[in-house]
Image (tube, rainbow, N blue to C red):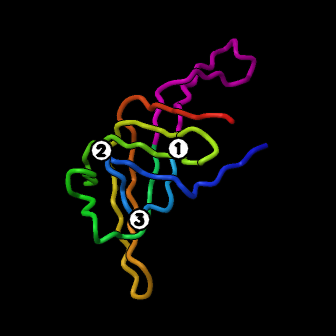
Amino acid sequence: MAHITGVEGAVISNAVEVLGIDKWSADLASDGIETTDFQSDGWKDRISGNKECTGTFEGDWETTQDISADPPSLNEGDIVTLKLEIQDTTLPLQYLEFDARISNINITVPQEGIVRFTVSFESVGAVTKVFATP
């Protein structure tokens, strides 16, 4: 089994890399719609419903980039094109790409430490998944 690191990952918003990011996560999910009836022999039946991708990315606040400017246009309620990259020099570029609504921006300002921010998002429409194998 081969493993890769996320050391070269990236978050791209509206074709511009968001600086300072050190972590992103994406949760790809599908609704389960229950279709249980009297012929189900006591077991629940389900079919797949709508799909979505939700997640966050976070990092250190970079004074050299205004994240609310256009681009990368990271403002609560805005729709942006996100590309979440899984970069590993041993494989072709792997990524998720989709339009997303920015649902929340959290800024943390500690007395001791680095100012950090977290952006939460939810997909709007289909998600393109590009994953490669060695």
SS for dot 3: loop
User: If you read the primary sequence from the N terminus, does the residue marked by circle 1 or circle 3 appear first?
Assistant: 3
Question: Gap in Å between the C-alphas at discs 2 and 3?
Answer: 16 Å
Q: Residues within 10 Å of mark 3 (few under 14, many from 20)?
A: some
Q: Is residue 116 above or below residue 22?
A: below
Q: Position of residue 49 (x, y in %)?
A: 50, 24
Q: Is residue 73 magenta?
A: no
| Residue occupying the point 32% across, 44% down | 15
Q: Residues within 10 Å of mark 2 (few under 14, many from 20)?
A: some
Question: Gap in Å between the C-alphas at discs 1 and 2?
Answer: 21 Å
| Residue occupying the point 37% across, 61% down | 19
Residue at the farthest top position: 39
| Residue occupying the point 38% across, 48% down | 12
The mark total stands at 3
What amino acid is at disc 1?
Answer: Asp
- Closer to the observer: label 1 or label 2? 2
SS for dot 2: loop
Frontmost residue, 38 versus 120: 120
The residue that label 2 is drawn on is 14
Q: Is residue 55 above or below residue 126?
A: below
What amino acid is at disc 3?
Answer: Gly
Indicate which disc residue 20 carries.
3
